Amino acid sequence: MYYRRPLHVLSGVYRPLPTERYIMMTMGGYWPIIQTLGNGHLGVVTRDSDFHVGERGRLVFVHSPDGGESWSHSIVISEEGSDNRNPAFGVTKKGTLLASFIKQVNYTDGAYDAVQETPNPLYISRSEDNGLTWTTELAKVEGPGEYTSPDNGFITSSPFGKMITRSDGSVMMHYHTKGGVTSFITSNDDGHTWNSPTVIADGGYNETGLCDLGDGRFLAVFRSNGDGSLSQAHSDDNGATWSSPVQITEATEHPGDVIKLADGRILLTYGRRTTPFGILGLISHDDGKTWDLNNRLLLVADAGNDLGYPSNIQRADGAIVTVYYSDQLIVRRRPRPEILGIHGASVIYRPEDLP
């Protein structure tokens, strides 16, 4: 399903981008993560459910053979047990697809129980055939943060976002704890085992987007537990140490995904999760040291109030694809408009339209 995006009230505040938008899935699409697969297709791991929080969540995979303009049916990665949620997604140097997630078990009589401290195990699913079939096992993480132990102290930890495959073949994956420590773990064996965590920031942060800047330099953009703004930190030593956090967006503007474009610019996208709602973006010309705040980008302006979690990829032809979810969309059709509920969508735009 394709339609052009109408401009909205946000267009007077932000710089609207010319985009084409395509529906990725309906009745689901929470927290989509996009990657380019070994066969050139685009793949997305996302949560299929009709509620943001609920026991019926299952993790699924969809793929696009035409750069994000059409999407396959959902292939189930995991639906066993309770709520399968909060995915991270990566492609290893060997072409293996890795999806990490937790099974949220903190439910009492079907309702989420924030007080209950039942461990939420971390899982790794693998696909060797570009997402057609998957196998799932408990993640094996070294050190005191080992997820396979029920008394590990990481009861409410969660992965998030795109995994980063380094030039040496190692894979970085972000995770965070309820206490506000954002970290990453690394696998050197195609995702079978993971090293002990390295802290990025400790002081009330969670969902984090990672970007490989090259030459051992990394950029991390993470959500605040407090006002919901985004902050960032840099590493110049392959992730061993990180700079102090610096806030870069306003309150309730989160979470972020950040990629380095082919021309060297850095693209950050994020959701504005308060009125006026939308999917926004920023550009940096100096690897994230500064951001062009005079040209805030508007990608989507007609989303509902549960929205965001954008994830970006640049295609081989230069076009940029951003996937996101929203709980409402009015499709202007005759004889009457159609209202979509929770859904995932992709928007496609050109780098020459960016500032």
Image (cartoon, rainbow, N blue to C red):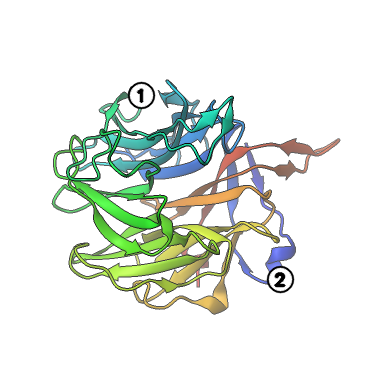
Q: Specify the quadrant that holds the N terminus.
A: top right
The structure residue drawn at horizontal position 37% and vertical position 44%, both measured from the top left corner, is 157
Residue at x 84% of width, y 37% of height? 336
Q: Is residue 185 left or right of residue 332?
A: left
Check the image and name the residue furthest to the right. 335
Residue 26: x %, y % from top left: 61, 32
Q: Earlier in the sequence, mark 1 or mark 2?
A: 2
Q: Amino acid at mark 2?
A: Gly
Disc 2 crowd rating (10 Å Cα; few below 14, some 14-19, many 20+) is few
- Graded by Cα atoms within 10 Å as few (under 14), some (14 to 19) or many (20 or more), the crowding at tag 1 reads some
Can residue 265 be seen at all in this image of the molecule? no
Count every numbered label the image shows and give the total: 2
- When asked about the image quadrant of residue 253, the answer is bottom right
Viewer-proximal residue among 128 and 117: 117
Please, what secondary structure does the residue beneath circle 2 have?
helix
Expressed as whole percent of the image width and height from the top left, the position of residue 123 reads 32, 32
Say if 242 sits above or below 109 in the image: below
In the rendered structure, the answer to whether residue 164 lies left or right of residue 208 reads left
**Could you say which is closer to the camera, residue 149 or residue 94?**
149
Q: Which residue is mark 1?
A: 132
Task: Report which residue position mark 2 lands on.
Answer: 12
Give yes or no for contact between labels 1 and 2 (Cβ–Cβ under 8 Å). Answer: no
User: Alpha-carbon distance for marks 1 and 2?
Assistant: 44 Å
Q: Amino acid at mark 1?
A: Leu
